[in-house]
Image (spheres, rainbow, N blue to C red):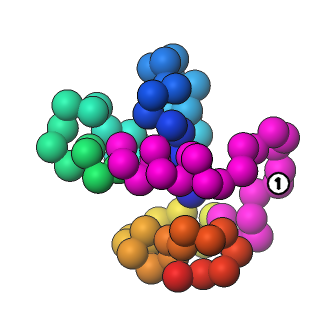
Amino acid sequence: MLVIHPDECIDCGVCEPECPPEAILPDSEPEAEKWLELNREMSEIWPNIVQQADAMPDAEKMRDETGKFDKFFSREPGKGA
């Protein structure tokens, strides 16, 4: 999971090819508020990514997994839920 600080986003669209279509919501949609707050909080905690890395070994297998946020999200990366 990647996050972008909502106050720093300039709506340039660079993230769109890297994200699943349902991952990006206009901030005018009602369900966007919880994601805006999560992005704001996590972008201030998690480290910035400064170089490209290879995909995780299970990336293809996990592509169509549903409910990933509820199953795998952690405020402490690498430590699980």
Residue displayed at 58% across by 47% down: 44
Residue displayed at 39% across by 40% down: 24
The answer to whether 42 is drawn above or below residue 13 in the figure is below
Residue furthest left as drawn = 30
Comparing 28 with 14, the one in front is 28
Residue 38 in magenta stretch: yes
Q: Picture coordinates of residue 53 (x, y %)?
A: 83, 50
The answer to whether 71 is drawn above or below residue 44 in the figure is below
Residue 65 can be seen in this image: no
Q: Picture coordinates of residue 80 (x, y %)?
A: 60, 81
**Residue picked out by circle 1:** 54
Q: Is residue 59 left or right of residue 6?
A: right
Residue displayed at 20% across by 49% down: 31
Q: Residues within 10 Å of mark 1 (few under 14, many from 20)?
A: few
Residue 67 can be seen in this image: yes
Comparing 15 with 34, the one in front is 34
Q: Quadrant of the N terminus?
A: bottom right
State the SS at label 1.
Answer: loop
Q: Picture coordinates of residue 30 (x, y %)?
A: 15, 43
Tell me which amino acid carries mark 1.
Asp
Q: Is residue 13 left or right of residue 49?
A: left
Q: Picture coordinates of residue 9 (x, y %)?
A: 49, 26
Comparing 43 with 32, the one in front is 43
Q: For the magenta stretch, what is the residue range? A: 36-59
Residue 40 in magenta stretch: yes
